[in-house]
Image (cartoon, grey):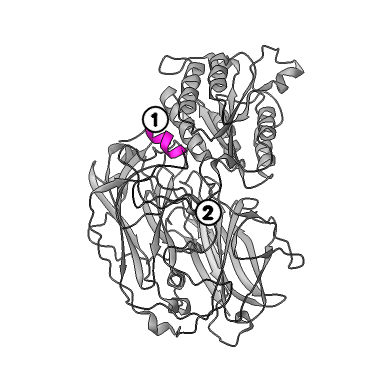
Amino acid sequence: MIKTLSVVGSILLAATALSWPAGAVERATDEPASDTAMMLVMDASGSMAERTGGGSTRIQAAKDGLDAVIDGLPDEQRVGFRVYGASDVAEDDPAACTDSERVVDLGSDNRDELRKAVADYEPVGWTPTSHALREAAKDLGDAGQRTIVLVSDGEPTCDPDPCVVAREIAKDGIDIRIDVVGFDVSGRAKKTLQCVADEGHGTYYDADDAESLTDSLRVSSVRASRPFDLTGTPVKGTPTEDGAPLLAPGQYTDTVAVGGPANYRVARTAPDSTVHVGAVISGVSGDLGAAATLGTKRIGGLTCASSTTYGLDMSSRSPVYYGGVSSWVRDPDSECRTDDELGVQVERSVGQIEGRPIELAVYEEPPITSDLAPGTAGDEPEWVAPTPGTATEAVPGTSIASAPEVGPGTYQLDISAGETQVLAVPVDWGEQVRAQVDAKLTDEVRDAAAIGSGLDVSVINPLRRDVTISLYGNWPEDWTRDPWANLRENIAFRTGAMSWPLHPANRSQNDTTREGASLAGMHYVVVSLKLRGDETNLPYTLTLERENVLGDVAPTYAEVEGLTPPVADSRLVDSPVTTAAEQTDDVEPEAAAQAGDSGSLLPWVIGGAVVAVALAAGVLVLVRRRR
């Protein structure tokens, strides 16, 4: 079972400009890797001199981990180093609460300086965590993709609350996050550090020895060089339509409005075009559930279409929710199909997502001139099991933004408790995606299982809509449906998912997931492990097939200057994504980082209806309303 990152794998994954094998897809953006910056912020308080369970001191474990990270940094990665609590001052001395020093400036040619600073790093002082976070944010500046990696072994000894400070820093923009490594912590100290990661839109990693600390630091440094889960041009929705920002096709970032809707506007290029709006919301770890309403509407008028997005993610350490809506209505004379400008609204319904980051993807589809009657889209297909082949190792993304493009085949991966992984697959008209997961459940996995535990698979369309055919109650015979805690050790586990075949007339369907299967383009296979615990890791294979089951059903589009019809290998909206078809043999899959504690999935109530089905991590069920 893979529990650690290989040095080779970490180095290659951290480098965004990899030497991919023949057939690999090139970078989808020319944005240089130097736009990313990482500030290592290390606790140098006196408690770091204590011994770990392995006999070494915490400080020595931290030094070993830092040295491993520095050795694996790509040349172009900008990194700095800050310590706090490194001065021998009395606790009641005011200087104890401002004791933080940037010992290595941010740069890409400073590896020797970093190594020397690590060697000189000694534990003597107190724990002014909040001050160190604020200073690290200043170190990183206000532009580009910025990550603070905080390593601490205890509670802060100075005000203010570092959770509040993390929230303040995160408000400065979508392009900054705070990852936290809690070293040998528990109780209140652990909860505080988890809160810093949540409020800082980052990830919390638990480390209890030198090996796990090193792994956590490596994983966080890898994430710093990847695209963030949410990407796009920052905008700010308004409480009313007045002054709402005008969105052209593309990707945008905002935060979920507090206490009401966020309004946006989209200009239509041609009458009868269809405006598609997708939403990706960064949830809160351990949330009982979240819901948001997305809608398209006439300016100053009625709603054209709306969808309510639901997500259950108590077992996800960094849940990401997907949903979408379009302007299309069946009535050919509706103003929703002809207005020069449309309104878009996003509003929280349930859950702790107010103030959380949100990505909006906007795509204008040219007018379709062919028949869109519902009866032309065909019947629901039967499940046909993909045949596993020789597995190729792959490094998945954590969301659409970082999902690598892959083709049909079998891929070797491993996933940790609460993690979500994403791969991108081109899908053309008439085609569907079938994804099959195979794994062996160990005692470790079974012991961590609880109500709702499982490995979930789903398929998301280019505009962030779930297009998975529900097989609930009609599962294939070779799928494993028994509760994990009741299964034998090393039993062969199998599950999967298939998408609705793509047909332009699906937009006329009343089935909410089928309606989304009306756009060719890049689709995203999402795999999530709903499981308790910090350390549980599950290797698995993912077999992907795409097949044309409908024949030639591509629609006819009107030619409109500036509008591009959807094609199989297009993401449909601009995104700074690095893609790759496969990994070389000497690259191990990214070992799963160790996340904070998570409980079992629980039923929750929305609008008086009890939702008792464990949904795929971060994937939303859409409830559709149309005029």
Residue type of the residue flagged with mark 1: Val
Residue in the picture at 45% in, 25% down:
68
Vertical order, 185 against 467 (above or below) = above
Q: State the extent of the magenta-drawn residues as a range.
A: 6-15
| Occupied quadrant, residue 511 | bottom left
- Which x, y percent locates residue 357? 61, 51
Q: Which mark is residue 289?
A: 2
Residue 161: image quadrant is top right
- Left/right of residue 388 with respect to residue 335 in the rendered view: left
Quadrant that contains the C terminus:
bottom right
**472 to the left or right of 611:** left
Residue 554 image offset from top left, x and y in percent: 40, 77
Q: Nearer the viewer, residue 507 or 34?
A: 34
x, y percentage for residue 386?
A: 25, 60
Give the residue at x 64% y 68%: 344
Q: Position of residue 24 (x, y in %)?
A: 37, 51
Does 503 sit above or below residue 599?
A: below
Residue shown at 55% from the left, 17% from the top: 116
Residue 5 visible: no
